[in-house]
Image (spheres, rainbow, N blue to C red):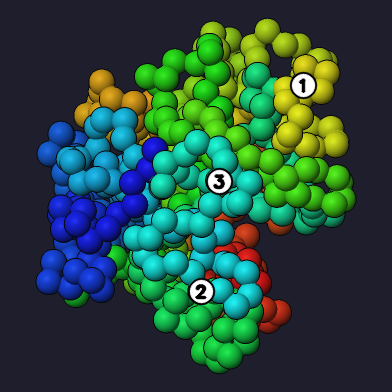
Amino acid sequence: MRKRVTLATVVGLVAILGVSPASAQTSPVVCNTTPQGTPITPALLTSGLPCAVEAVAPFNLVHLQDAFDFFSWLSFLALNAPADGSGPIGKDATAIWESWKNIFAVMVPPGQTPTPWGAPDPIPAICQSVPHDTHTAVLRMVGKTPDLLTAINQPFDTGPLIDQAGRYVHYEILINQPMFDYIMANKLYSKAGQDAFTGKVDFPAGVDAPPTIGAIMVKAAWKVLEPGDDPGSFHTETALLYQQAVVNPPIAESCRSARVVLVGLHVGHKTVAEPQWVWSSFEQVANVPSQADIDAKKLLAKYNFYDPACSASQCVVNTPPPRPWNPNVEPFANGYHSQIVRVTPLTAATVALNGQFQSILKGTVWANYELLSTQWPTDPTSTTDLTGAPAPQFLANTTMETYIQGHVPVTSSTCIDCHKDAADKPGHFSDFTYILERAQ
């Protein structure tokens, strides 16, 4: 069950989140300015959302990567605090980011205007008869790409992710209020509004002075809670799993309620010093092993998307499931499940940082999540490279870029390089987000 952040709860969240909507201008924005290298203690749990990266010398590649990873973890702590303002991150409650606007509630059918910030997102008609709370999330995607089932020819290797029970993983994309307000102010939620907009799409950027929270978009991956899963190891929610009707291939419209668990979280945060955005990627710790884990025979007894007992010939790794893809048919035909291996292992520095942050989250579900890495522009003001020469060059979340992991230019996952091609209309750059292309 989710609770929408409204004026009544925002005042209590200001110190944690640092967001001050138009309806609460009397509440100051608070930026977390905790510098890199600050001891990782429980005091950080209430430090709030950073508006910018607080790096300290020396400004070399390795030290800066640590600063951005520190920024990612501070963001994780703030964004996963309870949305009802009942305290800092800890209990398994609806998180702040879950109260934001779903892109399907922003990019609405022609002639419609999105519901205001704080209002419930529309529920598909077929879901109305399914028991649900007013703010229950509707998960409408079975891939990070919204049109995964209908787009036969994809520019890269893709497909749904199937868990060990043969069920589809579900996804959602949400945006924070500064991003939503910008879209509304410029009427970018419709093709007509985008055609009338003659300026450059430039979402607000976070900066410490004056304290400003920039645009943030969150992509989340959820799997259905199975009898063999330990709910104490996951952040859990009850959601409506909605499937729109598809003509080719034929898929019927459907809707059902399910208990789901968070397995992947990807955060894009625009800051003044990083106009290419800062990209932070997290996963549940038992999603998959790395190839190094397999080679060293250091495997967990159970993974979300890998079966240690299945031979390489029976379970081909990192391969999209065979067609047809129909989320209404579960478990997947012939006992199929995805067999996923992490191609690029976490660095020793990231593993160490994860351990420190997980230690202050001990005893909570949030201690079961780990940062993969943070991608950031090393040359953000470059006049010749729109991407700003990102580091690390490649970044892949196994729940979202499952089948395009690797180190091959153009074909392997890299957040900034992929999003540099985003446009709301041909030839019109949409500031590193594909959300605007969803306008009708």
Amino acid at the residue labelled 2: Thr
Position of residue 93 measured from the top left corner of the image (x, y, whole percent): 31, 35
For the residue pair 65 and 273, the one nearer the viewer reads as 273
* Vertical order, 331 against 206 (above or below): above
Which residue in the protein does label 2 denote?
A: 113
Residue at x 51%, y 65% (from the top left corner): 106
Q: Amino acid at mark 3?
A: Gln
Viewer-nearest residue: 18 or 180 = 180
Relative to 143, 211 lies left or right: left
- Is 314 placed left or right of 351 in the picture? right
Displayed quadrant of residue 330: top right
Q: Is residue 332 left or right of residue 417?
A: right
- Nearest to N terminus: mark 1 or mark 3: 3
Number of marks present in the image shown: 3
Disc assigned to residue 336:
1
Amino acid type, callout 1: Tyr
Foreground mark, 2 or 3? 3
Whichever of callouts 2 and 3 sits on the residue coming sooner in the sequence is: 2
Mark 1 and mark 2: Cα distance apart in space: 42 Å
CB under 8 Å between callouts 1 and 3? no
Q: Is residue 232 shown to the viewer in this render?
A: yes
Disc number for residue 20: none
Counting from the top left corner in percent of width and height, residue 151 is at: 80, 54
* Mark 1 / mark 2, whichever is N-terminal: 2
Residue at mark 3:
128
In the image, 292 versus 307, the foreground residue is: 307
Front tag of 1 and 3 = 3
| Measured Cα–Cα span from mark 1 to mark 3 | 32 Å
